[in-house]
Image: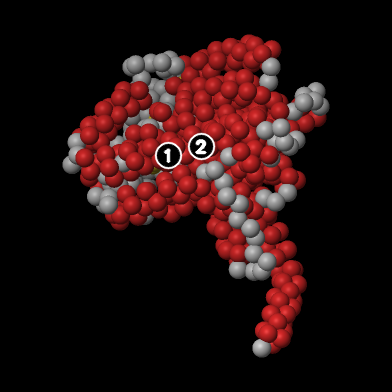
Amino acid sequence: MEQAAEGRTREETQGEDKNSLAARPVVQWLDRALVFWLFLFALTAPHSIAASQTAWAFGLFTWILRLMVRPRPLFFRTPLDYPLIAFVAVTIITALTSYAPDLSIGKLPAVSLFTIVYLTAENIKSRKHLRLLALALVASCMVNVVYSVGERIVGRGIKIEGLSAESPLAAAGIHDGDTLLSVDGRKLREPEELVAALDGAQISAPAVVKIYRFEWIGDMKVPRGRLRTGATPIERLGVKSWSRGREWRASGFYGLYVTYADVLQLIGSLAFGLFIALKKKRSMAGALLLASVAGISFALIMTVTRAAWLAFLCSALLIVIVGASRRAVIILLACALPVALAGLFVLQQKRNVRFFDPQDQSTTWRETVWREGVHLLVSKPRHMVVGVGMDSIKRYGCSWGLFDNCRQPMGHFHSNLLQFAIERGLPALIIWLILIFVYARMLWRTLRSQDVGGWIERGIVLGALGGLLGFLLIGIVHYNWGDSEVVDTLYFIMGLSIVVWRMSGSNASA
């Protein structure tokens, strides 16, 4: 019997060995596919939420297939496991107890983005891939930076000057200095195109002209067949002159300038961390990284987003304090002064507000929703324990008296801390803060490790630490956790940082 058992054991072992040998080509292809999807994610995250989340979805599917094939990969524990999973679990509970469970449960796919951390951290096995992924993220971001700068140089639409009171444009509510972007869905490049669209009296419906006016983009209905007489298109439109519009806030390929600014802050911090960690700054790598930081900084200024400006400045200061000498801190402060002055000038020109402006509508609006949010939070014990549920304010906000009794557009509470507390309860907020603390502690311990690796590994952790500070500062006055594009990038950098932690000696003391 013992001989038979030993024989079966040998046969089973031999069979498993044969299966493993047969599966090796499959394992290799799946591992390569995982790396491919990670690189595709890094290359598309700065540009398109659809493309990056497609890469994430295919990466998850490939990872599931890989887990089904022997030899199965090992799982690496991380310091973030408990707080991250606890935060997700509490979020699911609050979705089930929501005032509007259907809306809250519909938000859970966005919650599942946390798997980006593990998809990245568990499937990067070599320092080469780690380094290339970090550099790919920065290099890819430069594509939209160049696009934003080029678009600003070329201009957009038709900016009208000297608008006559008798002009059909003025009668439709268009003001002097407005930029006309499109007519009936077609982009405008020349006044002749607008004249051709407004000259057709045979069409009874008015033309829909999209305009840009400071921070507002709207559609104006302009009657057709009412152009003035004149020899030139601008005379018929009733304007003295026109030029290309260049007043809009840069948004890259996203379409939302606040989202773009937040992503620029994260990737810019990563690029700056890499530059500070580089020992030979007078090199080709140093020149490219410095150009990347300068380009991202310029694009960030063009977003005219005050919170992101301040966050990036604080991020850079933290990176220099932790990763460089006192002399570098002085140099940074000296460089920051003219950049800050340029930013204030752009802010005044593009938004017509000061950096701290109590009369600014965005400031007074935040004060209103914060006051309403705190009142809603403390109005019932249930709200403090499990919150009202994600997105439930879209259904019950008016009955709760939010957004100035719905006299203002329905939105969110413009603060990560307040949004978490109201939608998911105070326990969820506390767990999230613990998660942030544990992540920051992991980054700090990794930086203190003597075996962190090369300059790229150190730069990743420096950039992640600075970017985390910037993200938290922005989150005081913005709900940037609600932007999937921003969270995608944050989670990806978090995953890269975990790989550095795992490969360094700091994980032994965690």
Specify the label residue 56 is tagged with: none
> With respect to residue 59, does 27 lie above or below?
below
Q: Is residue 503 visible?
A: yes
Q: Secondary structure at mark 2?
A: helix
Q: Amino acid at mark 2?
A: Val
| Quadrant of residue 11 within the rendered picture | bottom right
Residue 72 locus on image (x, y percent): 64, 64
The answer to whether residue 285 is left or right of residue 470 is right
Mark carried by residue 432 = 1
Q: Is residue 263 visible?
A: no
**Rendered residue at 61%/33% (across/down):** 445
Q: Position of residue 442 (x, y in %)?
A: 57, 36
* Left-right relation of 369 to 304: left
Q: Earlier in the sequence, mark 1 or mark 2?
A: 1
Q: Which mark is residue 438?
A: 2
Quarter placement of the C terminus: top right
Rendered image quadrant of residue 497: top right
User: How far from the left and from the top, in percent, is residue 118?
Assistant: 57, 51
